[in-house]
Amino acid sequence: MLGLRKDHKLEGETEAHLVRGLAEIQTRLNRLRGYEVVPETGNLEPKALLNCTLIEQRLLRAIRLTLKLLKDTRPVSWSFLIRV
């Protein structure tokens, strides 16, 4: 999570909460991808693999949404409009 904090340069509790959520989603995604290794041994049924794929898609959507929310919480800088 420290890497995510550095990448996003947090400015407030809302951003900290979103980055924490992003880290949790990434952890779940990594754990799920660990289960996908099992089909090579033949221990995972096709239905379970389909469920893993659906869950992975949901987690990836959650990451995209969280990143968008994080971007949208940043204040807009209007300094580019000011001419010196």
Image: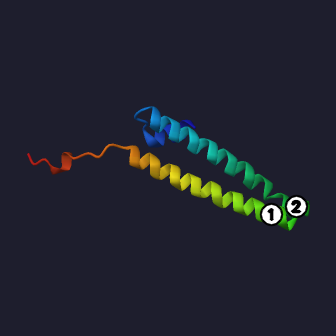
SS under mark 2: loop
Q: Residues within 10 Å of mark 2 (few under 14, many from 20)?
A: some
- Quadrant of the image containing the N terminus: top right
Give residue 47's quadrant in the image. bottom right
Which mark is on residue 5? Answer: none
In the figure, 71 relative to 20: above or below? below
Residue at position x 68%, y 51% from top? 29
Query: Is the residue under label 2 in contact with that under label 1 (CB below 8 Å)?
Result: yes
User: Where is 63 relative to 8, above or below?
Assistant: below
Residue position marked by numbered label 1 in the rendering: 49
- 14 left or right of 62 in image: left
- Nearer-the-camera pick, 43 or 75: 75
Residue sitting at the far left: 84
The amino acid marked with disc number 1 is Leu
| Residue 44, x across and y down, in percent | 87, 61
How many marks the image carries: the answer is 2
Quadrant in the picture for residue 84: top left
Which residue is most to the bottom? 46
**Regarding mark 1 in the picture, which secondary structure is present there?**
helix
* Residue 34 position within the rendered picture, expressed as x and y whole percent measured from the top left: 77, 52
Q: Residue at x 47, y 43 (%)?
A: 7
- Name the one closer to the observer, 69 or 39: 69
Q: Residue at x 90, y 61 (%)?
A: 41
Please name the residue that numbered disc 2 is placed on: 44
In front here: 34 or 17?
Answer: 17
On the image, the x and y values in percent for residue 46 come to 85, 67
Q: CA distance from mark 1 to mark 2?
A: 7 Å
Left or right of 10 on screen, residue 59: right
